[in-house]
Amino acid sequence: MNGKFFNRLNNFLVLVTYCSFLFGCCLTAAAGERTLIFPTPQETSLLEGHFKLDEETLILVPENAMKNDIFMARSLAAELGDKYGLALKVKHVSKLHFNGNFILMGTVDNPLVKNYCSQQSLRATADNPGSEGYVLKVSKNT
């Protein structure tokens, strides 16, 4: 009786392991086919190049940054540190004349964001894309 029980248990464990493997493969394939940005973008366009995220990448905030801007920058730095071991620095700047990779984020009230949107011909206002909308542009350095 014990031999049958252990044989069935062994078969069950092999089946569970196999199903887990297949389920994991399906999830990996599905993640590659869909965006991992939430909420899902309403429109996207693929640009040339790759953004290199490393220890040299800075998170830029205005010199007179609002609390929300500083909070978002520090939260992103902490998240990237926890998940990927990257120690990104938050730097206060007056203008976007930085050479190298940088991350810029904030509301349209942020003067750096406003300036960047103007330079890149991105239309971003309080009404467009709306209170829960966003504009995300990734290029070789930004």
Image (cartoon, rainbow, N blue to C red):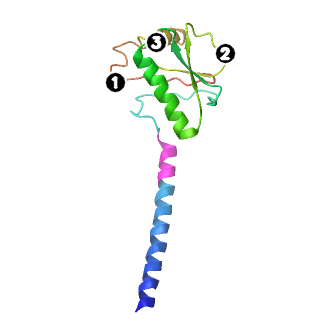
| Labels 3 and 1: the sequence-earlier one | 3
Magenta highlight range: 27-34
Q: Quadrant of the N terminus?
A: bottom left
Closer mark to the observer between disc 3 and disc 2: 3
Q: Main secondary structure of the magenta part?
A: helix
- Mark drawn on residue 99: 2
The residue depicted at 63 percent of the width and 22 percent of the height is: 101
- Looking at the rendered structure, the kind of residue marked 2 is Asn
Mark 3 Cα within 10 Å, few/some/many (few <14, many 20+)? some
| Labels 2 and 1: the sequence-earlier one | 2
- Circles 3 and 1 in contact, beta carbons < 8 Å: no
Say whether residue 5 is left or right of residue 87.
left
- Residue bearing the label numbered 3: 65
Closer mark to the observer between disc 3 and disc 1: 3
- Residue bearing the label numbered 1: 132
Q: Nearer the viewer, residue 72 or 105?
A: 72
Residue 15 position, x and y percent, is: 46, 72
Position of 78 relative to 90 (above/below) = below
| Labels 3 and 2: the sequence-earlier one | 3
